[in-house]
Image (spheres, helix red, strand yellow):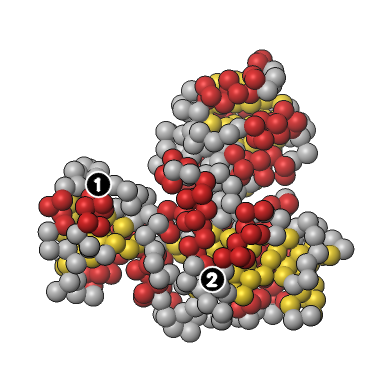
Amino acid sequence: MEKILVIGAARSGIAAAKILHERGAQVILSDSKTELKLDLSGVEIKLGKQTEELLNGVDKIIVSPAVPIKIPLLKAAAKKNIPIISEVEFAYGLAKSPICAVTGTNGKTTTVTLLGLLLKEKFSKVGVGGNIGFPLSEVALEIGAGGYLAVEISSYQMEATKNFKPHISAILNVTPDHLKRHGSMEVYQLMKEKIFSQQTAEDFLILNYDDERTRDMINRAACKVLYFSRQRELAEGAFIKNNLLVIKYNGTIHELCTIDELGIKGGHNVENALAASLMAFLAGVEAEKISGVLKTFQGVEHRIEFVREIDGVKYYNDSKATNTDSAIKALETFAGHIVLIAGGDDKGTDLTDFLNLVNERVDYLILVGDAAARFKACALEKNFPAEKILEAGYSMERAVELAKEISRPPQVVLLSPACASFDMYSDFEERGKDFKRIVREL
């Protein structure tokens, strides 16, 4: 009987442990947290300090995305030549249907959600999972053969992959993020590029022509590469022509819809729609079917999500903006007069471009969480008026109350933190739901 150690008792780790046990393996599920309520029949649970004793007799290790491969236990396992794979790699071994995989710093969730809907126009069985919604191992088993998988992939998930090979992959953009985990921009980009490292001539890679880092990846790809672009017409790929989203492939242009007809708004969402459409087209979805979905898709929760209008002021939840680049895209969606709630678990990234746009479009800046002091200091250095910076401590309720007190039409209130959420919440979803609850109770 194979003995497998699963490290990390979050959703993906729990899913892998269950599946492994059902398939006859002896499974140990380990997590460094000391208090977790887990009820997994037949799975040995080990909580707390992770010593090398956990490795005794272990044939393989499956690691959850949240667990860095640099932790001492995994270093010790590597010295013992114990194979270490990610949950995504494990899921790839289970998958019987082709995979469309999307990575990038921003836009992944919107693109994958839209991609799932587009694939459903052709395939009766479509699974959406990975870094979004459900663990990929669960989704792969549920869909089985004869369908398609739309998968969101993070840089964390790629750290311990070796053989993961989607049929169609896309890298939307690469901007500074997760540098605490990866150590440098170069390593972070390398994790992104692993998504196409195993692809061959019969596979496809979709890249953002407008992003210098992604455009250059063609030089390291062995598969067929196509671009999407919001800024220029391309010889082949997906782009804008006369205000129309189009796909040009094998010399034929397929018109999809106008920018105004697109259900999701903002320049970044035009890019997401181009990428998802091109992937679906290559998977076999007809252009006419793609067009219909693009016109009706309204986006995803926590991404510039309209919550409510109060006294002529609209409130938007953009909790998914966990980095400055994503927050910039949200700010660009509005013409100005923004009351911005920002801050949280500070990633330490450069704030220059973000604050330049804050100066242009934000009337009031309300700061929360660990990042508040640095954000305030940097905003003052950029000459943002001190009297228009308000601090709400670690209270989302106070932040929303302040926003309601100061906002007047035509202003909008936007939660777009430019930070992770872990100083106040378990994840960005919990943060967004709390913001919406508070707004709805006003």
- Residue at the spot 57% in from the left edge and 26% down from the top edge: 375
Residue 258 in view in this figure? no
Query: Badge 2 local density, few (<14 within 10 Å), some, or many (20+)?
Result: many
- Residue at the spot 37% in from the left edge and 60% down from the top edge: 160
Q: Residue furthest front?
A: 219
Q: Is residue 23 above or below residue 109?
A: below
Secondary structure, mark 2, is: strand
Q: Is residue 116 left or right of residue 65?
A: right
Residue of label 2: 100
On the image, which quarter does residue 60 sit in? bottom left
Marker count (numbered):
2
Q: Is residue 54 above or below residue 169?
A: above
Q: Nearer the viewer, mark 2 or mark 1?
A: 1
Q: Nearer the viewer, residue 187 or 381?
A: 187
Location of residue 56 in the rendering, given as x and y in whole percent from the top left corner:
12, 59
Query: Badge 1 local density, few (<14 within 10 Å), some, or many (20+)?
Result: few
On the image, which quarter does residue 380 sit in? top right
Q: What is the spatial separation of the Cα atoms under label 2 and label 1, in whole angstroms?
A: 34 Å
Location of residue 161 in the rendering, given as x and y in whole percent from the top left corner:
39, 63
Location of residue 7 in the rendering, given as x and y in whole percent from the top left corner:
27, 55
The amino acid beneath tag 1 is Pro
- Determine which of the numbered discs, if any, sits on residue 72 in the image: 1
Q: Earlier in the sequence, mark 2 or mark 1?
A: 1
Q: Is residue 416 left or right of residue 268?
A: left
- Residue at the spot 75% in from the left edge and 58% down from the top edge: 230
On-image quarter of the N terminus: bottom left
Q: Marks 1 and 2: in contact by CB < 8 Å?
A: no
Secondary structure, mark 1, is: helix
- Determine which of the numbered discs, if any, sits on residue 432 in the image: none
Location of residue 41 in the rendering, given as x and y in whole percent from the top left corner:
18, 63
On-image quarter of the C terminus: top right
The amino acid beneath tag 2 is Cys
